[in-house]
Image (cartoon, helix red, strand yellow):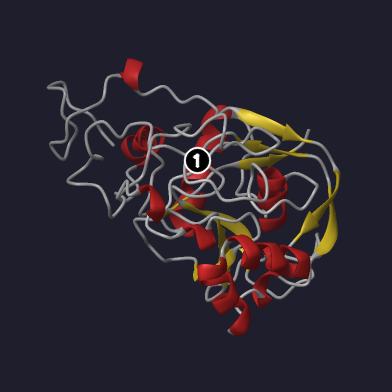
Amino acid sequence: MPVSNSGLNAEGWEVIPTSQNKTKPPALIQIPGGSFIMGTSEENINLLQLKESDWAYDWSDNDLFAAEQPQHRVTLNAFEISQFPVTNAEYHSFIWDSGHRIPRTWTGYTFREDTDNHPVVGVSKTDAEAYIRWLSQKTGVEFRLPTEAEWERAARGDDGRIYPWGNTFDPWRCNTAESVKKGTTQNGSYSPSGDSPSGAADMVGNVWEWTQSLFMPYPYRPNTNREELKPNGRYVIRGGAWYYTRKFARCAVREGILAGHLSPSIGFRLARSAA
């Protein structure tokens, strides 16, 4: 956007000083190549019925676990994933530099006070990809959205655990409806107890996260057409969110959403292929 000498841009918006608007690449976690267990097994379901009987039997009776089955092994190349989702402050820099549209959840031209380090929400997959193109150009590092397999590998490690920390839900390790926060929480609020084996934070709860994968039946096969761009395709979101209950805060939960969908519970984090 063009800037005038008065400290306002051509549309009358206040200009953020350069010292507050530096573009830095996010903290990345290296995930080694190899195989991991993806999806939900019958043993997982039996364990959930034992520990989470108030909803797990209902899900089983209504075949709601089917999208997560069959459980299978997937082999991935090494990759990197950001430790945290993209924040309001990070996305704000993109907005001011590029003139991209404002997230639906913001008031006026900025986010709510004291939420700088909260994950940005109200962004579509298309918005997320615009941010990624901008950040890649600014930093010289090629970022992208994670595939859903990469996301799950980063969330649960290679041993098939149900939650990032183990097989028992703990409301003190993530932001779900049980936490009664009634909104997003600052990145890392549940670290390190809620972190995944790889060290990624907030992989379940807080916000759903976009992936670049189309919502298709299992088994997942890398390097197929799952990552194609389709105008009317439904893309996988992962992780559950602040106003969803614990039943969605599992590493294997997957939902399919249109790329243009906007929600106060959906954000994103970054990934990149290993050099």
Q: Residue furthest front?
A: 50
Q: Quadrant of the C terminus?
A: top right
Q: Secondary structure at mark 1?
A: loop
Q: Is residue 160 above or below residue 70?
A: above
Between 82 and 250, the residue placed more toward the observer is 250
**Residue at x 80%, y 46% (from the top left corner):** 158
- Residue 71 x %, y %: 79, 66
Q: Residues within 10 Å of mark 1 (few under 14, many from 20)?
A: many
- Residue 172 x %, y %: 47, 40
Q: Quadrant of residue 230?
A: bottom right
Name the residue beneath numbered marker 1: 85
Decide if residue 242 is in sight here. no
- The kind of residue tagged 1 is Pro
- Residue 214 x %, y %: 63, 68
Q: Residue furthest bottom?
A: 62
Decide if residue 121 is in sight here. yes
Q: Quadrant of residue 224?
A: bottom right
**Residue at x 83%, y 64% (from the top left corner):** 72
Between 18 and 51, the residue placed more toward the observer is 51
Q: Quadrant of residue 154?
A: top right
- Residue 208 x %, y %: 48, 55
